[in-house]
């Protein structure tokens, strides 16, 4: 039901005339000067220094051969170098391709090759994962960023410091609103990942709309522990702060035991949380710091009706629930600040139209489950295309609506309620992963005949990964061997948590696996990877 206890805060004025990232940085530097724009731990970047330093790095990138329209791949954590590279490339009219720092093997090679990047900037701690695929990529230049405790450069790489030119780049024509600013990879369900091409206009439109519903106020600090290679941290934290003359603060990764202390140290008033983070924080032992922080608003995706009010009461925050995806904005639906409805992901933001449809793309009545489809109200406010995949782009935009693949219901007041994913994509700890990628690796093992990978409910929310495996005749492969085989070839978040050996997979008469019969299925016969002591961690 509706909750009207909230008071809508004074709205901050956004700059409607700004349509590209380069103009945004320059205009905000003139307005805000030495006011802090970004905080990465103890490192501070003011609006003025962000503008000045990205001018110098833009000049250095140009001198190194990076031209307008070029794509530069980045394997970087939440550090100042990410922001400097992002906006320096924007000033050149070049394109950032931020890659998941957990990638390795064929997936890493595929994404870099697919985007046709000619240059790479990498954190040296990730060089070991990059090295096995390096020879197949033929990069023109590779730069390694500085890292505390590491003075050595990975073999054959140039230091990041050489990109900082002694003089600023000559003024370039500002990018057009329709020009690509980034390529963000998003997993499909039956094939390899797709690169969503993000134009400058979208990068500014979505954060502007987010700001209008985020209960922002003068002096607010937006904090996230989510990675900047995802649209969430980019749009909901970094750009929402810049557009509203505020400060964005970042942690390199999510630490549940010290989350509120870290947020307090950053002066955070607003945080962004995924459902797994909400549930993990809620399951932590209670302590005084649960309410001694300055955070008052938590932007969340996937908070359940049961946990939502208890989380608010325990941590002293107001949850503003939302829904989004890379292609149509990391936030597409969001609760209005003065009229939040428990359990709802909100109403459409101003830049999109939304409706729910059946399998024939016909609108369904209120209260009836349907697939969410959306389309922009203005040009270039959603993604441009899937890079190099015109057929996938057309498929997604069937009948001139972008099909999200997610099932929802809508109430008579226009509030939407998320139900489930129509697609097979598995959502684990904030990452979308395609079963296809995991199955391909498992099936490469000489002892595996075939496999199917599904999501099963996780204790902390979202899903864990389970594989059903049919073994080949002969000496049987064991679970531990197969877990280790997968861990050597997949990002940590893709390695199955559970593995069950079966004699055969359920199939149709045309021999297609009936995946829906296995999705969410726990039989008690599966082997838990963690029970074997194989607990995987993010790269450090």
Image (cartoon, rainbow, N blue to C red):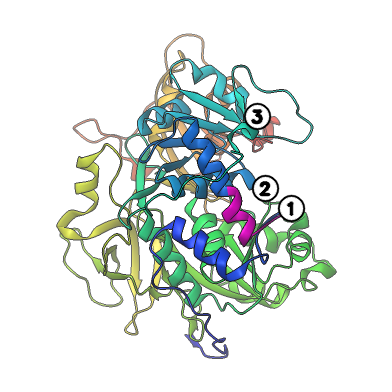
- The residue tagged 1 is 41
- Does 371 appear above or below 97? below
Helix, strand or loop status at disc 3: helix
Q: Is residue 43 magenta?
A: yes
What's the CA distance linking mark 1 and mark 2? 9 Å
Foreground residue among 532 and 210: 210
Q: Which badge, 2 or 3, is on the more N-terminal residue?
A: 3
- The residue tagged 3 is 124
| Residue 460 in view, yes or no | no
Foreground residue among 210 and 487: 210
- The crowding category of the residue bearing disc 1, from other C-alpha atoms within 10 Å (few below 14, some 14 to 19, many at least 20), is some
Residue at image coords 38%, 56% = 200
Foreground residue among 94 and 502: 94
Residue at image coords 67%, 51% = 254
Side of 166 where 4 appears, left or right: left
Q: Which badge, 1 or 2, is on the more N-terminal residue?
A: 1
Q: Position of residue 30 (x, y in %)?
A: 56, 67
Q: Position of residue 253 (x, y in %)?
A: 66, 48
1 and 2 marks in contact (CB < 8 Å): yes
Residue at image coords 19%, 33% = 509
Mark carried by residue 252? 2
Side of 424 where 236 appears, left or right: right
Tell me which corner region of the image, top left, top right, bottom left or bottom right, holds residue 479: top right
Q: What span is colored magenta in the figure?
A: 42-53
Kindly give the residue lying farthest to the top in the view shown.
474
Helix, strand or loop status at disc 2: loop
């Amino acid at each position: 039901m509706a909750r009207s206890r909230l008071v809508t805060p004074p709205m901050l004025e956004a700059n409607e005339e700004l349509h590209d990232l380069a103009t945004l940085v320059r205009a905000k530097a003139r307005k805000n000067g030495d006011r802090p724009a970004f905080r990465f731990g103890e490192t501070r970047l003011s609006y003025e220094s962000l503008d000045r330093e990205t001018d110098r790095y833009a000049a250095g990138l140009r001198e190194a051969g990076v031209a307008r329209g070029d794509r530069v791949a980045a394997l970087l954590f939440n550090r100042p170098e990410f922001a400097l590279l992002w906006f320096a490339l924007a000033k050149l009219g070049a394109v950032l391709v931020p890659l998941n720092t957990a990638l390795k093997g064929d997936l890493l090679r595929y994404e870099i090759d697919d985007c046709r990047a000619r240059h790479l900037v990498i954190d040296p701690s990730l060089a070991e994962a990059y090295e096995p695929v390096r020879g197949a990529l033929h990069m023109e230049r590779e730069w390694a960023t500085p890292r505390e405790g590491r003075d050595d450069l990975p073999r054959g790489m140039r230091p990041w410091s050489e990109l900082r030119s002694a003089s600023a780049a000559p003024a370039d024509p500002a990018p057009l609103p329709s020009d690509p600013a980034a390529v963000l990879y998003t997993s499909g369900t039956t094939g390899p990942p797709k690169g969503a091409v993000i134009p400058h206009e979208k990068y500014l439109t979505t954060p502007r709309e987010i700001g209008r519903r985020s209960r922002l106020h003068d002096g607010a600090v937006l904090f996230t522990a989510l990675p900047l290679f995802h649209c969430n941290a980019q749009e909901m934290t970094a750009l929402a702060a810049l557009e509203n003359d505020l400060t964005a603060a970042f942690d390199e990764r999510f630490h549940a035991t010290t989350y509120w202390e870290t947020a307090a140290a950053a002066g955070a008033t607003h945080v962004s949380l995924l459902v797994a983070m909400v549930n993990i924080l809620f399951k932590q032992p209670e302590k005084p710091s649960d309410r001694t922080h300055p955070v008052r608003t938590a932007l969340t995706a996937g908070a359940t009706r049961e946990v939502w009010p208890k989380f608010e009461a325990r941590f002293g925050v107001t949850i503003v629930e939302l829904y989004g995806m890379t292609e149509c904005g990391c936030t597409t639906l969001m609760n209005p600040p003065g009229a939040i409805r428990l359990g709802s992901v909100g109403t459409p933001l101003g830049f999109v139209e939304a409706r729910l449809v059946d399998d024939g793309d016909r609108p369904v009545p209120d209260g009836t489950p349907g697939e969410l489809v959306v389309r922009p109200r203005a040009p270039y406010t959603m993604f441009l295309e899937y890079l190099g995949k015109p057929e996938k782009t057309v498929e997604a935009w069937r009948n001139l609506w972008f099909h999200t693949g997610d099932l929802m219901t809508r109430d008579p007041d226009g509030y939407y309620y998320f139900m489930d994913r129509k697609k097979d994509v598995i959502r684990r700890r904030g990452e979308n992963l395609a079963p296809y990628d995991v199955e391909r690796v498992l099936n490469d093992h000489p002892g595996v005949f075939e496999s199917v990978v599904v999501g099963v409910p996780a204790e902390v929310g979202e899903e864990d990964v389970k594989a059903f495996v049919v073994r080949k005749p002969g000496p049987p492969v064991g679970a531990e061997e197969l877990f280790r085989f997968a861990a050597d070839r997949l990002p940590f978040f893709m390695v199955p948590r559970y593995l069950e050996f079966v004699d055969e997979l359920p199939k149709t008469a045309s021999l297609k696996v009936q995946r829906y019969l296995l999705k969410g299925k726990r039989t008690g016969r599966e082997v838990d990877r963690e029970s074997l002591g194989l607990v995987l961690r993010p790269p450090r």
